[in-house]
Image (spheres, coloured by chain):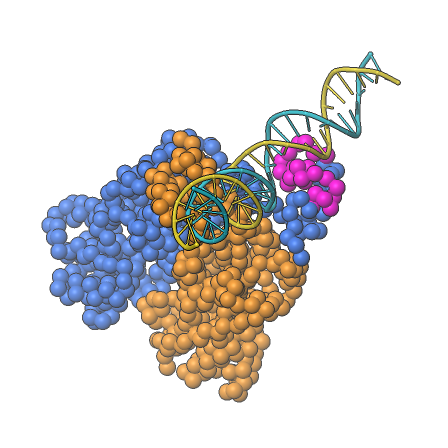
Chain colours: A orange, B blue, C yellow, D cyan
Amino acid sequence: MERINIKKLAEALNLSKSTVSRAFRDNSDIKPDTKEKILAKAKELNYEPNHYASNLREQKSRTIAIIVPELANNYFSQAIHGIERIARQHQYHILIYVTDDDYQKEVDFIRHLHNGRADGIIMSASGEADDHAYLNNLGAKRLPLVFFDRIYEDIEAPRVITNDYDSSFKATEHLIQQGCKRICYLVVNKNLSIGKTRMRGYQDALAKYQIPFNEKLIVDCSNSYEENALIIKNALQDLKPDGVFASVERLAFATYYACFDLNLRIPDDLKVIGFSSLEIAPLLNPSLTTMTQPATEIGAQAAQLLFNILEGQESVETIQEVVLKSKLYGRKSTAK
Amino acid sequence: MERINIKKLAEALNLSKSTVSRAFRDNSDIKPDTKEKILAKAKELNYEPNHYASNLREQKSRTIAIIVPELANNYFSQAIHGIERIARQHQYHILIYVTDDDYQKEVDFIRHLHNGRADGIIMSASGEADDHAYLNNLGAKRLPLVFFDRIYEDIEAPRVITNDYDSSFKATEHLIQQGCKRICYLVVNKNLSIGKTRMRGYQDALAKYQIPFNEKLIVDCSNSYEENALIIKNALQDLKPDGVFASVERLAFATYYACFDLNLRIPDDLKVIGFSSLEIAPLLNPSLTTMTQPATEIGAQAAQLLFNILEGQESVETIQEVVLKSKLYGRKSTAK
DNA sequence: ATCAATTTCTTAACCGCTAAATTTAATGGA
DNA sequence: TCCATTAAATTTAGCGGTTAAGAAATTGAT
């Protein structure tokens, strides 16, 4: 069976292509009568306008791209879920790109996306905090871009983040109030802006309570499960902390595993708090105290900002920053 | 700044469009010398061939669509991760569609996708087990489709599943061997093929141990957290089971919550096992015995099957069924 | 130097759809 | 009935690429 297209449909109806085209769009130059006939016949023949053809013609794709460092991850899958919801409302499609925390992949993806495939990009960055000339080099051609969670400070683009500084401050303060004096800060990459911001919160909270800052207690982890297990085990043994603040969810899990191995009791020997958006934190052993990020909402907001630009309600010049608050849920892992 | 296109690039180089086009494809009709010059200039001017134009011309999109019932879910995000890995190797892009378990949305998505936007579909079905004429109605035009996890028996398409029957049988047997006599089977939708298959395994295992099957112990749950909490609490109180077999991950979590509320001790008062792909099952309180599905691998395999078709290595006629085994991990939630 | 063979490039048609410009048909007032 | 208006349809020219067919340039054997 041959593929149906507008020409064939037009012939079947004894009409011209453009009349048929009008039936599928909000165009007044068509008799309601004929419009109905066309739509009926289209359904019968299973016709749908070819998106590539019309997008080529209209110069837009009704598609947004999402770039994330990883996918099999609570936070990002919830955020994507939020984006998806909003995109669906606007009848947009979403493309997913995963960088595996590889900056070069991110650069390639973005470069590639500037070929018409997408109208805009929502991204949580993979690169480190400094020089991202590649983005600005795209100049006026640059697609509308919205950051969420992991941002580049040097790029002018709307962004949706959590109150990372305050949250870290409070998380650290919480550990202190629960009696901790030697608090490890676990971070995946010290140079990511988000790691930096969160670390400042940690440091300032220590300062407030006159706890001297100890560089050694900053533990730089990796992206590999196995490596992290080792790194954290070593840290717990060598540094003998009485509290751990995990700047990302999976480092909290790794800490739990390490404690099992080392026979450390949480919260008696070690108290643990972590940024997280895990819904089953209360089910952990012991239940995990979390600084919970509104992941779905963050995604939804990011999408909203992008659509504000795409649908022209917002000047691209206005760089918005939306801050959604994380919330502390005290549970057993930090009990006194 | 104007958008660059092939024509402008050609003019800048004093060449024709077609020569420039050749530089970007594996075409011998071009002098290596000129090809280099063209690519250099292209990089300088930030030119990339417009995908919509070339896809329109070539009648393929190098894009696959993934349709899943939900996104913020361990299993599906891992599966998508697996698909993404393979798709990237083949230089394909992926579109994501979420049905929220709404069959009508699935129908709409699939219908819409038959307009050139995607070359193939990987889907975990949202509909129930019987009549899916809509798919066959697309006739020869139907895009290559591969199912994973939740399939439609009546649709001829390659599929990647786990050994659901055996796994359920073994999971149930495990509970029996650990001393359970009244085992609840929790299912989200009795009519989904996957729910049915898993239930047969449950029933047959009971039969093997001469435990009479009791219809009441089949507890049909919903998709809402709140409703499930209630349904399961009621079931635990009314039916007084000594074991629970959750056919999907989140029902195991719901059971944990219900037990907290009812002050039931796992595993002493109630043993729990669940299908799951949760990596932190050992961290739960108590650690959860799981029938673990190789979610990432399932996704990767599904993608592989699709590419076999798309890249013509496989006759579309050969309907393959790939079965990847789930594995039982005994943990404290089913300890004697 | 000549000409056939080969290499390299250009011309032109087309992919399927949209919209401006234009033609044809319908409507209504004098 | 005639003509000006308005409504509804068609013609045509792209959108930005690809490629078959043909033209021009290069190569090499005699």
Q: Position of residue A150 (x, y in %)?
A: 53, 66
Q: Residue at x 41, y 43 (%)?
A: A48
Residue A152 part of the magenta segment = no
The image quadrant of residue B160 is: top left
Q: As displayed, is residue B174 above or below residue A86? A: above
Which quadrant is home to the N terminus of chain A? top left
Q: As displayed, is residue A15 above or below residue A326? A: above
Q: Position of residue B68 (x, y in %)?
A: 37, 51
Is A16 positioned to the left or the right of A145 in the image?
Answer: left
Q: Depth check: A212 or B56 in front?
A: B56
Q: Position of residue B104 (x, y in %)?
A: 31, 50
Q: Residue at x 46, y 65 (%)?
A: A304
Residue B15 part of the magenta segment = yes
Q: Which residues are magenta?
A: B9-31
The image quadrant of residue B230 is: bottom left
Q: Depth check: B141 or A104 in front?
A: B141
Which quadrant is home to the C terminus of chain A? bottom left
